Amino acid sequence: MRIRRALLFMPGDDRHKIEKGAALGVDSIIMDLEDGVALSRKPEARAVVAAALREVDFGRAEKLVRINPSSVHLWKEDMAETVAARPDGYVLPKVESAHEIRMVDSYLAAAETRYDWPVGSIRLLAIIETARGVANLRDIAESAPRLDALIFGAEDLAGSIGAIRTPEGWEVFYARSAVVIHAHAAGLQAVDTPFVDLNDQPGLAAETRRALMMGYTGKLAIHPRQVEPIQAAFTPGAEEVARAKRLIDAHAAHQAAGTGVFELDGKMVDMPMVRAAENVLARARAAGLDTGG
């Protein structure tokens, strides 16, 4: 599964912004056909996105398209106009049931067969942003093999339950935790909700760090200047990598000597700590860092 630290939204009806996003070095670009595009401009946006998929050099960035919810007819038009340009994946908003994932999965399988592409090559990412979506997380997470990630959407969720948004986020903490737990239980990535205050860089850094500590693997970005801080937060630093490597090497040596739990730097080391160190190295390798083997 490819690395997705920052996933940057770009309005689907603005070719210039899509091209700008493609030059940022972001892991994933989400060309938006849903909330970021007025209803009257959706036909134009579909054409812009299809042309961008064919013509823009995205470099190593993943090319994603956010379609409209499957609860409205627009999603089929979104996919019909863009699938031939072969995006890397689609982002499904306001997912509330496994049926919605399977419906889109079937549509994509038919398209892949029609174009003689490997079935399952176009990936899916599901946004969980309603009360019903949270209630059905287990079924959604296990719905289709092409599903790569669950994305948490705090703003829409708060609106759907009548919650008042606060800087601390306690009103959405249960749902934020549930998304990351169900994602990992199903072997999926977990992508955190965007930070909406564009002028609060310290707040973005703190919120992204909190997402990492909760187990999230990436975070949505809604402005280009959010990309670098998010990707930096989800990339282990040199000291963190060295510490993880030393712990794993020590674990291997103690295992060879027949020792289970051991002490390192004054702390007892057991398997949960070893797995945490392995996760650090996995994140480092995914980011292209040298972990020394």
Image: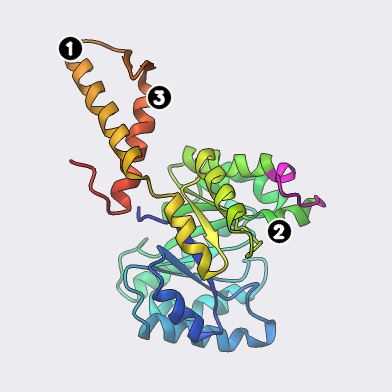
Please tell me which of labels 2 and 3 falls first in the chain. 2
Q: Amino acid at mark 3?
A: Pro
Asked if the residues shown at circle 3 and circle 1 are in contact, with their CB atoms under 8 angstroms apart, the answer is no
| Residue marked by disc 3 | 272
Is residue 135 shown to the viewer in this render?
A: no
- Is 136 magenta? The answer is no
Badges 2 and 3: C-beta atoms under 8 Å apart?
A: no
- Badge 2 crowding class, 10 Å Cα cut-off, few under 14, some 14 to 19, many 20 or more, is some
Name the spot of residue 59 as percent of width and height, x first.
Answer: 32, 73
Picture layout, residue 50 above or below residue 126: below
Dot 3 or dot 1: first in sequence order is 1
On the rendered structure, is 73 left or right of 85? right
Residue 276 vertical placement versus 268 (above, below): below
Q: Which residues are magenta?
A: 162-172
Q: Position of residue 92 (x, y in %)?
A: 56, 63
Look at 31% across and 51% down and name the residue there. 286
Residue 138 in percent (x, y) is at 57, 41
Quadrant where the image shows the C terminus: top left
Residue at image coords 68%, 82%: 39
The residue that disc 2 covers is: 156
Crowd band around label 3 with a 10 angstrom C-alpha radius: few (<14), some (14–19), many (20+) = few
Q: Is residue 206 visible?
A: yes
Identify residue for label 1.
Answer: 257
Q: Main secondary structure of the magenta part?
A: loop
Question: Splitting the image into 4 quarters, where does residue 168 fall?
Answer: top right
